[in-house]
Image: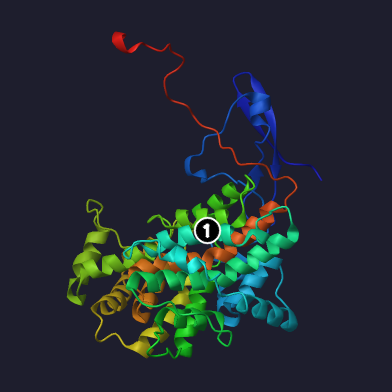
């Protein structure tokens, strides 16, 4: 079979660049030898047209509205599977047998407790610290408490770190929440599933235990599942870049959490809720719909459309089902934010303008509604996102570390500053 190449012409010289064909998605021009041969760099701010790695974990087709984990559609996984099974799939490449899943779930469940001395680390933060600040610090500090799983060259230590991070992240997130609201920490229980354990650690108090409603636990599990991995996004790329230096896994995941904290990345569902609060009441929705259509108005409907998905967000359909179940269970009569959300969804879906531009409600719109209804403050939305995405970060980290072709990340630049000049003594300036 003839290998495909691309020809780059610079002045009088031409260069043959090899092309690589994936199992899905567009072909890729291999520019690794471009500088050594042609003495030029490529320029791609935001890396929107650059494949920084090869991966077998997650594939997104934005035009089709398709998200696959190891080949399995996200809607099937969200409907028929659950978060820890999806974790196994992402980590090991295949769906587990019943025995393998049971063993994996037991392993994760029995590692949910934190080293007791880490409690003192939480108490070093100000009482009004943002939960994401706490999570970034505590996860990074895990390398100071778990020395036996920081050697990235040891396959066993990598596996131990993997289980620890997946198991302990709900405990860390719940403790970050409890700390910011001034309530005692609630320890995990081994008789509860992953999502139920997290909800109980967030909402139980010593004076009264929290009975986990199965509908809420299922909705929480779906939020975890739908956010588990999303290919080479900003935080995942950050984890990979940090990992390329050989940094320990806890430091790499802490870097991913820090990146996720950015409002353009992990804060979308919080921005959506803030927009709903700005709208305030159902009767103001027509006004804001018209503002969203006005190109001269700065207002934008948050939680609608997606940078990658040019059709619909495949996660949103499943999340909408959960949102409907949760709102049915908890009711929206006393919550004006949720009333506005339901009516805004109806109005936007019925409007031809949004349909033509494919501005459908995305996963962030519905996840924010669910978390608000459950009683989480908006400051906890991104920590829950980080908790969910941990398995994706770890899967990408493991894949990268085991790649024999791995090298430290070192992007180049288009330098536009001053060229060589001599130092001027202060008296001559």
On screen, residue 288 above or below 49? below
Q: Is residue 247 left or right of residue 364?
A: right
Which residue is painted at 50% across and 79% down in the image? 187
Q: Is residue 37 visible?
A: yes
* Residue farthest top in this picture: 428
Q: Foreground: 316 or 3?
A: 316
Q: Is residue 204 left or right of residue 27?
A: left
Q: What x and y, as percent, mark residue 54?
A: 67, 51
Q: What x and y, as percent, mark residue 175?
A: 44, 72
On screen, residue 408 above or below 104? above
Q: What x and y, as percent, mark residue 45?
A: 48, 40
Location of the C terminus (image quadrant): top left
Which residue is painted at 24% across and 53% down in the image? 298
Q: How many marks?
A: 1
Q: Which residue is mark 1?
A: 141
On screen, residue 246 above or below 229? above
Residue 64 placement: quadrant: bottom right
Residue 78 placement: quadrant: bottom right
Q: Is residue 16 left or right of residue 330?
A: right
Q: Foreground: 318 or 259?
A: 259
Q: Secondary structure at mark 1?
A: helix
Residue 174 placement: quadrant: bottom left
Q: Is residue 59 visible?
A: no
How is the rendered protein coloured?
A: rainbow
Badge 1 density bin: few <14, some 14–19, many ≥20, Cα 10 Å:
some
Q: Is residue 251 left or right of residue 266?
A: right
Which residue is painted at 69% across and 42% down in the image? 19
Q: What x and y, as percent, mark residue 271?
A: 33, 63
* Residue farthest right in this picture: 1
On screen, residue 347 above or below 421? below
């Amino acid at each position: 079979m003839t290998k495909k190449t691309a020809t780059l012409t610079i002045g009088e010289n031409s260069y043959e660049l090899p092309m690589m064909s994936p199992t899905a998605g567009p072909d890729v021009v291999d520019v690794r030898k471009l500088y050594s041969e042609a003495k030029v760099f490529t320029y791609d701010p935001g890396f929107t047209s650059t494949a920084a790695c090869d991966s077998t974990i997650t594939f997104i087709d934005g035009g089709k509205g398709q998200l696959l984990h190891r080949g399995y559609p996200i809607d099937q996984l969200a409907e028929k599977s659950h978060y820890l099974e999806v974790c196994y799939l992402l980590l090991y490449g295949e769906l587990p047998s019943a025995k393998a899943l049971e063993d994996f779930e037991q392993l994760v469940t029995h590692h949910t407790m934190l080293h007791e001395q880490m409690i003192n680390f939480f108490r070093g933060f100000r009482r009004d610290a943002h939960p994401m600040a706490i999570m970034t610090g505590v996860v990074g500090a895990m390398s100071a408490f778990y020395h036996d799983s920081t050697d990235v060259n040891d396959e066993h230590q990598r596996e131990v770190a993997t289980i620890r991070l997946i198991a302990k992240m709900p405990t860390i997130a719940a403790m970050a929440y409890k700390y910011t609201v001034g309530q005692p920490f609630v320890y995990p229980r081994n008789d509860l599933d992953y999502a139920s354990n997290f909800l109980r650690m967030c909402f139980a108090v010593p004076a009264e235990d929290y009975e986990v409603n199965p509908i809420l636990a299922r909705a929480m599990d779906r939020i975890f599942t739908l956010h588990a991995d999303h290919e080479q996004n900003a935080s995942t790329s950050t984890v990979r870049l940090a990992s390329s230096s050989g940094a320990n896994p806890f430091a790499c995941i802490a870097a991913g959490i820090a990146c996720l904290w950015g409002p353009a990345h992990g804060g979308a569902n919080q921005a959506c809720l803030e927009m709903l609060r700005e709208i305030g009441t159902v009767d103001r929705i027509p006004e804001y719909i018209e503002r969203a259509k006005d190109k001269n108005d700065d207002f934008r409907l948050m939680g609608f459309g997606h940078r990658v998905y040019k059709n619909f967000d495949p996660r949103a359909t499943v999340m909408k089902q959960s949102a409907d179940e949760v709102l049915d269970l908890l009711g929206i009569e006393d919550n004006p934010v949720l009333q506005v959300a339901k009516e805004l969804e109806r109005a936007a879906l019925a409007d031809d303008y949004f349909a033509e531009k494919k501005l459908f409600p995305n996963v962030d719109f519905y996840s924010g509604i669910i978390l608000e209804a459950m009683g989480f403050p908006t400051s906890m939305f991104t920590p829950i996102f980080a908790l969910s995405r941990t398995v994706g970060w770890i899967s990408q980290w493991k894949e990268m570390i085991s790649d024999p072709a791995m090298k430290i990340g070192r992007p180049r630049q288009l330098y536009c500053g001053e060229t060589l000049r001599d130092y001027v003594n202060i008296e001559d300036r």
